[in-house]
Image: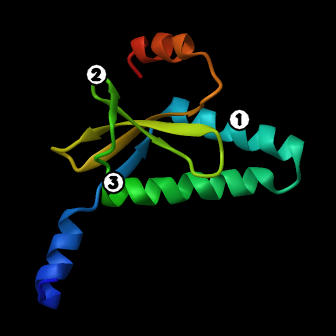
Amino acid sequence: MYWIGKKLKKKLKKNMVFKIVNTHKAKIDTFEAIEWYNTQTTGLGKRFYLEVKKQFKILSKNPYFQIRYEDVRCLPLEKFPYMVHFIIDEEHKRVVILGVISTSRNPKEWEERADSNF
């Protein structure tokens, strides 16, 4: 491994941070999932929320995950059957979260939603 000076390493790290921007629909998705998980087991909604936050942190550092359709990329949650759907706005260094969608949801619902132009 090559040695990188502290100043250069800090500069590289700073340049790679993307701002996470949640759309209104993504916020609703997350809230509804938290509510549903809390009805299943006390505290499970909080665990879901923490998992979503963890994935957002990963996306802020490196959002270049697989493109699923058009420009929309997806990142699955590790412990819950959900995927974060997002696009990258490289010009403004932003990751725009379009939805936090259950993997059991009918894909046609997502297509209809994607067509509604977030």
How far apart are the two marked residues, 1 and 3, measured between alpha carbons?
23 Å
Observer-side mark, 3 or 2, equals 2
- The disc at residue 32 is 1
Q: Residue 16's quadrant in the figure? A: bottom left
Q: Which residue is mark 3?
A: 19
How far apart are the two marked residues, 2 and 1, measured between alpha carbons?
26 Å
Residue 95 x %, y %:
33, 45
In screen coordinates, is 106 left or right of 62?
A: right
Residue drawn at the location 23% of the way across and 50% of the way down: 93
- Tell me the kind of residue under disc 3: Lys
The quadrant the C terminus occupies is top left
In screen coordinates, is 73 left or right of 12?
A: right
- Tell me the kind of residue under disc 2: Glu
Check the image and report above or below for 2 versus 59: below
In screen coordinates, is 20 left or right of 38?
A: left
Residue 66 x %, y %:
33, 38
How far apart are the two marked residues, 3 and 2, measured between alpha carbons?
21 Å
Give yes or no for contact between labels 3 and 2 (Cβ–Cβ under 8 Å).
Answer: no
Q: Residue 60's quadrant in the figure? A: bottom left
Residue extending farthest front: 1
Q: Which residue is mark 2?
A: 70
Q: Secondary structure at mark 1?
A: helix
Check the image and report above or below for 59 versus 14: above
Observer-side mark, 2 or 1, equals 2
- Tell me the kind of residue under disc 1: Glu
Residue drawn at the location 16% of the way across and 83% of the way down: 1
Residue closer to the observer: 105 or 13? 105
Q: Residue 96's quadrant in the figure? A: top left
